[in-house]
Amino acid sequence: TSRHDPHRLAEGVRGVIGPEAALMGGYAVGIITNEELAYDGYQVGIALFAENLGSFELFKVDNLPNREQACGKMLGEQITQRLAQPVGNNLMLFYDSVDRTTEQLRLNMAEPLLKGLAETLDAAALEGLVGAGLVGDMSGRETWQWFGDQVNQNTAMALLLGGGLRTHSLVFHGCRPASDYLTVTRAEDSTVLELDHRPALEVISELLGKENDVPWKEYSFFVTLGVNLGEKYAPFKEENYQNRLCLRTDIKRKGMVMFEPDLVAGTEVQLMRRSIDFSYIQERVDRLFDSLPEGREPLLALYIDCAGRAGAYCGMDEEEAAVVIEAINNRVPLLGLYSGVEIGPVGGKSRSLDWTGVLTLISR
């Protein structure tokens, strides 16, 4: 987490694992394991792979701010230079979410990064891609990443699994529509300025109603808009929704600055109501394990969980990640992290997601 000195932490990890192991990592808001979870403290988590389990290729590009798409393309080029094309379901992406290169907090965007990757890697290679936008705390302080013996900022890193290793993923959302469809009629970069030709903040305020009279400035990390990637008025299917969280509000222009710049004019959205259904987690986790093809052995569960879903931040008495821990039930080692952005398959392709949990099994 951001409470650690990144250089001394790297030295400490090297002191345990030795100088030869390939190392990749980054800041997180907290850590989840088979036995416990914690956040907003001094947590550290690490997963170790024996080299005879498969092969592992690590890639990195620097200087993400304002050039995410170009960095994605360069990362893809590095991968194709090493291997013609990944086979699919064997690629992970981790990147620095926080841009502190200027006085104002800005986010490095995942969607342009993914778009750049898609310029170089074909759709099959990106199938099943999972990953995370890394943050060290909920206040958006500077983040750090580790790559080999380097300590970096504003990097994007890819992990390519080989030697028969594959990933198998499912996505937990936890939001349901709370409005009819609204059309974004004016947007600028990642700021939604108008919905149905009216100031966005006024529209959201009316939809929330007087009983939820929340000041506009408190919409940050609270208001969520969803894009239905399935049939428009079909019965609700959580797996068809890509959700976008409000990062902060632009009071002067009555707009909402979202976590990604993809809610452009013409996009249909719905206001989403948060409702994590704990009852279905066990059944979906069991189904993920059961879905592994015959002869494949699960080695590790990786859980990338939006930091906003932690109980202290979303106002729940229970911890959603604790239910995931119970559902996995020590069938495999578990390493989880609380992230800023999650990347996982929704609507037939891998996308950046907000207020989501992405559970991935790595198998051989």
Image (cartoon, rainbow, N blue to C red):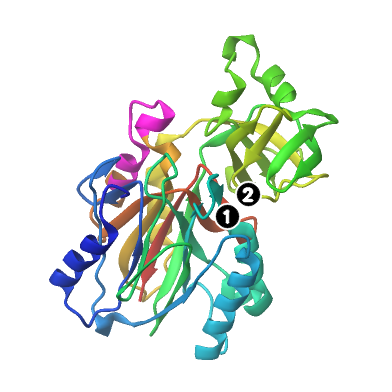
User: What range of the chain is rendered magenta?
Assistant: 311-325
Q: Are marks 2 and 1 in contact (CB under 8 Å)?
A: yes
Point out residue 21 in the picture as x, y percentages from the top left corner: 24, 79
- CA gap between label 2 and label 1 equals 8 Å
**Any mark on residue 352, and which?**
1
User: Is residue 83 in view?
Assistant: no
Is residue 317 one of those drawn in magenta? Answer: yes
Q: Nearer the viewer, mark 2 or mark 1?
A: 2
Of 56 and 8, nearer the camera is 8
Crowd rating for badge 2 (residues with CA inside 10 Å; few <14, some 14–19, many 20+): many
User: Is residue 166 in view?
Assistant: yes
Point out residue 24 in the picture as x, y percentages from the top left corner: 34, 70
**Any mark on residue 171, and which?**
none
Given the current orientation, which residue lies at the most extreme right position?
Answer: 197
Point out residue 213 in the picture as x, y percentages from the top left corner: 59, 13
- Dominant SS of magenta comes to helix
Given the current orientation, which residue lies at the most extreme front position?
Answer: 103
Indicate left or right for 203 with 106 as reference: right
* Residue bearing mark 2: 260
Residue at the (26%, 83%) spot, across then down: 51
Q: Amino acid at mark 1?
A: Ser
Of 140 and 342, nearer the camera is 140
Is residue 316 one of those drawn in magenta? Answer: yes
Residue at the (34%, 42%) spot, across then down: 321
222 above or below 344? above
Residue 326 position by quadrant: top left
Crowd rating for badge 1 (residues with CA inside 10 Å; few <14, some 14–19, many 20+): many
Given the current orientation, which residue lies at the most extreme top position?
Answer: 210
297 above or below 352? below
Of 245 and 129, nearer the camera is 245
Q: Helix, strand, or loop for circle 1?
A: strand
